[in-house]
């Protein structure tokens, strides 16, 4: 990391350095080094905020929510989760809304707020179903288009064959 950081500090654009910090944060998160994960997660988030990259801001907030949840700092986790939810709404990030609602469920279950956990589970299910429905509709539309194109091609092939037969 240090070598990559030295190289990147001089040659990389700001986005790449922010991505590097986010990746390092994730690595520390995965090996349960929460303080280091938080440190690099904050650095990545601050760079994303300065760069006004809303997608990276969303990811940064969500990752910090996960880090604080893992550290059993549920109030901080909820603050970052609320921020990620606000950004997800602003950029219409439907797939992220699913992950955010799932994390809300975990937080509320951990704090014993089962009513809120149920509420967020219902939202999670609605977002997930909506996304799956949208993907299914798109897939059906694609298959229908593919079928219709195939039918037209078969007609063209038949007419071409008939024309060749008539020419003989």
Image: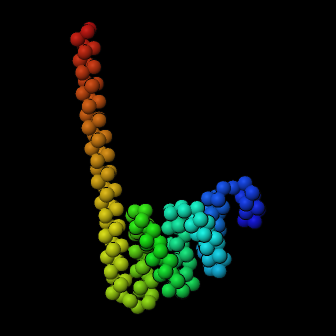
From this viewpoint, is residue 61 visible?
Answer: yes
Picture coordinates of residue 156 (x, y %)?
A: 27, 25
- Looking at the picture, the colour scheme in use is rainbow
Q: Residue at 24% across / 21% down in the picture? A: 159
Q: Is 51 situated above or below 147?
A: below
Q: Is residue 103 left or right of residue 143?
A: right
Instruction: Say above or below: 106 vs 63.
Output: below
Q: Is residue 45 left or right of residue 117?
A: right
Q: Which of the pair 74/143 is nearer the observer?
A: 74
Query: x, y percentage for residue 66?
Result: 52, 77
- Compared to 120, does 60 lie above or below? above
Decide which of 89, 19 is in the foreground and name it.
89
Indicate the quadrant containing the C terminus: top left, top right, bottom left or bottom right.
Answer: top left
Q: Where the N terminus falls, by quadrant?
A: bottom right
Residue 161 position, x and y percent, is 27, 19
Residue drawn where x is 33% and y is 74% of the image: 123
Which residue does the image show at 52% across and 83% down from the upper left?
76
Q: Residue furthest bottom?
A: 112
Looking at the image, is 66 positioned above or below residue 74? above
Would residue 95 be visible to someone looking at this image? no
Left or right of residue 147, residue 67 in this image: right
Q: Position of residue 101 (x, y in %)?
A: 40, 74
User: Residue at the spot x=26%, y=38% of the render?
Assistant: 148
């Amino acid at each position: 990391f240090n070598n990559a950081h030295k190289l990147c500090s001089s040659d990389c654009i700001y986005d790449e350095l922010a991505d590097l910090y986010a990746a390092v944060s994730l690595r520390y998160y995965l090996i349960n080094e929460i303080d280091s994960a938080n440190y690099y997660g904050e650095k990545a988030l601050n760079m994303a905020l300065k760069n006004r990259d809303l997608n990276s801001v969303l990811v940064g907030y969500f990752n910090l929510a996960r880090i604080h949840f893992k550290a059993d700092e549920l109030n901080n986790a909820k603050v970052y989760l609320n921020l990620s939810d606000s950004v997800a709404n602003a950029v219409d990030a439907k797939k992220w809304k699913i992950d955010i609602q799932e994390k809300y469920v975990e937080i509320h279950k951990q704090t014993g707020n089962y009513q809120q956990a149920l509420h967020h589970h219902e939202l999670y299910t609605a977002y997930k179903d909506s996304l799956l429905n949208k993907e299914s509709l798109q897939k059906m539309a694609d298959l229908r288009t593919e079928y219709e194109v195939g039918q037209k091609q078969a007609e063209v092939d038949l007419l071409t064959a008939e024309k060749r037969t008539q020419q003989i």
